[in-house]
Amino acid sequence: MLVRGKYALVNTSLGEEGIKEDWAVCIDRDKIVETGAYDVLKQKHPDHKTIGDGTQLLMPGLIDAHTHGAGLSFVQRGVTFDFLENSLLDFETALDLEPETNSILNAVRHIQNGCTTIHHNNWSMPSDPNEIENCEKKIKAYESTGIRLGFSLGIRNKNILAYDDVNFFKTLPPDLQTETEYLINIDTEAAVRDYFDAFEYLYNNYHKGKVRILLGPNWVQGSTDSFLEKVKARADELGGLPIHIHCLQTPVQKAFGLRTYGKSLVGHLDDLGLVDHNLVLGHAVYLNQLDIDLLASMKASVTHHPSCNLATRNGIAPVYAMVKAGLNVALGIDEKGINDDEDPIMEMRMIYYLHRQAGIDLTNCPALTPFDVLKIATINGAKPTGYEGQVGVLEPGMQADVILVDMDEILNRPWVSPNCSIATLFVHRGLGRHVNTVIIGGTLVMDQRKILTVDTEALYKEVKEQANRGMTPDQIHYRDLLYRIKPYYQKWYNSWLKDLEFTPFYNMNSRY
């Protein structure tokens, strides 16, 4: 198979040197075996089928390095956004789909917008007896779509009800204490044993082909130190398997670290030996400069979710400082994209424009370039998803994850200067709906905007039937319980915030 493009973004880390014209890649089975001028490769391989009409942009498949696998967004499921700590209660009350349906719909939404690799960070209650069964359903569903998958198991083995939940529990009235006591009395060691039993089963049965089974404790503040240390030890035994942890997503989480450890949560992770090349921090909005420098020096990664961070009122992560420090920053949509459609190109544009206020020196404060952003959505996502050195660039020996983007609207509607860089135009004007063709591991998964691995109309019908069933009585009871808890929960966290001090990385405005 030959895949051709009028333009090609061969390697986004090379800047303009990585852009080629009238280019093609030659694919044999699941690998790229040769790249070069299309005319040369076609003459050399006359019997190879050609994909692409010669007017399109050829580029590596995009990577969503952080999703939780929801097929429908929270808004579609009837939940609007607020501060994360408020939203966490609301999220628990949203209607849900069957595990397989969620995963297939999530994959389809990604593929339609040019994502060839995703990382699904799974959340479940500790010692869930259905953990393995539900995870298998999700993984097999993803496999059926053809998408490349990183799948991490995640639990909290403490602080289920709230951060510092033992002390929070004491603030509740007796009736709510009675109803929530089971969330406090967690057998933390049994939860860890059950977690690793599930991980080992899934790793031994599914860590192959286009699936990577990763480790993913949900939160630093939701994990005992011994749990985190065991995760790190097992990851190292398996050759440096990525470890995904949500960290410093909100000011309340920043306050938790200072109250509990007297330092940033990143500092606490470092004390435990987890800050290393295989650590991946989700969100990381409230990193300080010491955190950034430490993470960069240890070659760790961060997943950045610009729209999600705005939707859940987290703030703006200091991505400019991360990139300038050399920290590996990868894109994460987190089911909360600005367009509510899992469009990674729109998220790239959000990154491009959101992080332009790191200073006000007109001569010595360059902003992120389009290539910085393209790296975040391609090659930088390979490492945290478990595919470092295998995806993210169009070079011989790499997995054949390739997309073609229709350029007519980007270049010709109604006119664009020929002096504009293709990279700039793509980041500034591209949309997920411009993706025409998706090839994953050498398999044609979407052609002319049609998904070939899934009957999408039947899928959408099934989604509607499941969603229309509504919530179960147990879910409604749990929702009502959380609503009763919410005022105590808000008071608990508000008391933490009054002493926090902030010196922003970005100069957004001035009160005086």
Image: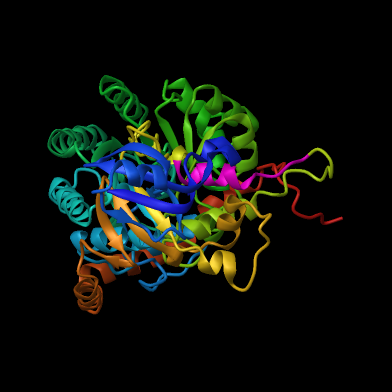
Residue 226 at what x, y percent from top left? 32, 26
Examine the rendering and report whether any part of residue 474 can be seen. yes
Seen at 62% across and 27% down, the residue is 290
* The magenta segment: 365-378
Tell me, yes or no, whether the highlighted magenta stretch contains residue 375: yes
The colour scheme is: rainbow
Pick the residue in front: 3 or 116: 3
Q: Is residue 209 left or right of residue 38?
A: left
Return the residue nearer the eye: 158 or 288: 288
Q: Is residue 435 left or right of residue 46?
A: right
Viewer-proximal residue, 167 or 466? 466
Res. 144 image quadrant = bottom left
Residue drawn at x 35%, y 29% is 228
Q: Residue at x 38, y 66 (%)?
A: 73
In the picture as drawn, the residue positioned furthest to the right comes out as 512
* Residue 421 pos. (x, y %): 63, 51
Which image quadrant: the C terminus? bottom right
Which residue is pictured at 35% across the width and 71% down the height?
77
Left of 357 or right of it: where is 75? left
Count numbered badges in the picture: 0
Residue 451, percent across and down?
A: 27, 65
The vertical placement of 264 against 63, above or below, is: above
Identify the image quadrant of residue 185.
top left
Answer above or below: position of 389 versus 320: above
Q: Is residue 185 visible?
A: no
> Foreground: 90 or 77?
77
Q: Position of residue 496 (x, y in %)?
A: 58, 46
- Is residue 184 magenta-colored? no
